[in-house]
Amino acid sequence: MTQLSRRGFLAATAASAASLLMPARVRAATDSFALSATTRVIEVQGRAATVMGLINAQGGQGLMLEPGQRFRVDLTNTLDVETIVHWHGQIPPNAQDGVPNTNAMLKPGETRAYDYAPRPGTFWMHSHIPEQEIGLLAAPLIVRSAEDARADRQDVIMFLHDFAFRTPQEVLAEVSGGSAVDHTNMDHQAPPVTGGMAQMSGMMGMGNMPGMMGGMHGMGSMAMDLNDFEFDAYLANDRTLDDPEVISVERGGRVRLRVINGASMTAFWIDLGSQTGRLVAVDGEPVVALAGSRFSAAPAQRLDIEIDLPNDGVAVPILALREGARERTGIILAPTGAEVPRIPALSEVEHPPVSSDMQQELALRAAHPLPERPLQNGQMVMLMGAMQPYVWTINGRTWENRVPVTARSGERVELMFHNMSMMAHPMHLHGHVFQVVEINGTRFPGAIRDTVLVPPMNSVTIAFDAGEAAPWMLHCHHMGHLATGMMTELSISA
């Protein structure tokens, strides 16, 4: 039997991946990509299910760009409803961000062109309409770096989602008790309101607020809320553990596992079993390598994990464990000839909460931290809400009554997310990356991110340099929370 060289194997598996999950670029004269927002049929637990998707010209989900390629995309809406697609973690001009407060909705049959220089790393794309994201209108967006192209390793993508046989509208109605709003008709010209809690800290440094946070991170006997909805299935690359995706890998090879938590409401533990991996990037940004066999991923977060595979030819399951529950999903990495294990969709015991465990975040260090410079704008952002009534707010206000968080372009800004609710909130800032610099009063040079999890009754402070003068969305990435009001704007002036 002819043995492939490692380079030959990697080339062959890259070609295979390019024909399936994320086909390679369209090799046209314009070097452009085509994407369609559409419906598709997948099989879940033996049943056919019609879901949404972002399909490329070769029929696969999402896009992979090679080093140096521009994000030059023609997006066509083939749905029978309006949509808008956000390039999560990328920093295009505001006019191309894909959000309904500043960008026109894409009408059925309409095609819109996007063109900008992308940031390398593991990203994703999704509708910015909560019902549509729940309906799986989401896909990977991988931008390979020159270092990726040189490296002797195989790219493997694990795209996670939560799935219900009910319609997304029914899911939101059950979660919210009818308090969710229709985000397909957002007011593009909502007048700003002056005053409010967003300005309460003014120019105060976040470390100079004595008494403000004392003891707040001790939840005592109060019960933390974890999962708002019991989904019917949890998917990895559109499949369950009843019929997982089996990815061909090389014995003793190295894999860069790109995990994307595209779930609408679910946090996961990524479990490597007996293997030890190295977490080398989060949200597309390099970190000082962190070794482990289990890593957490809140909704919208991404993890890049390097794994050196064993030489024994045994298959390696990579599992995603739903927090606070027994459900799990995953993929199987299998060398040629390996026996593929059968893994039940339920663990024997419940998995611990992700939402109260900040040990990983505290341990992460940015490979390229923000440059040191004086703080010019420090503000507290209050995260509030409750299960009954199911309404979630930023600074005590829903989207319709928002008071934008303000900054001037070029300022060094720190925002303290102060969570006064009993649920965790994965907070996402558009148009920027930020550094996690403080958790509950402990300062440290943490990871560079675009989405950070803020646990119940805790505080997390982020730092960034304000970018393009425009209104940029700032919101919780839990779709039930977003749909009932947990969204505002970072309004940057020139």
Image: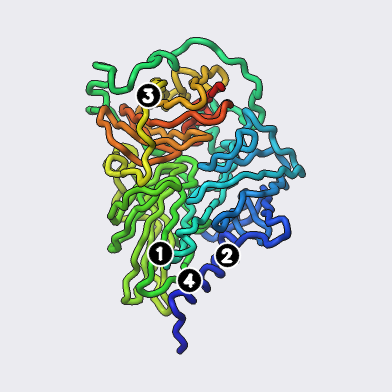
Between circles 3 and 4, the one closer to the viewer is: 3
- Residue 58: x, y in percent? 66, 61
- Is residue 292 in view? yes
Mark 4 vs 1, N-terminal side: 4
The amino acid type found where label 1 is placed reads Val
Circle on res. 255:
1
- Residue 142: x, y in percent? 53, 53
CA distance for labels 3 and 1: 40 Å
CA distance for labels 2 and 4: 12 Å
- Is residue 53 in view? no
User: Which residue does the image show at 28% across and 23% down from the upper left?
Assistant: 207
**Image-based side of 124 in relation to 345, left or right:** right
CA distance for labels 1 and 2: 16 Å
CA distance for labels 3 and 2: 45 Å
Q: According to the image, label 4 marks what residue? A: 10
Q: According to the image, label 3 marks what residue? A: 375
**Image-based side of 478 in relation to 459, left or right:** right
Which part of the image, by quadrant, shows the N terminus? bottom left
Q: According to the image, label 2 marks what residue? A: 18
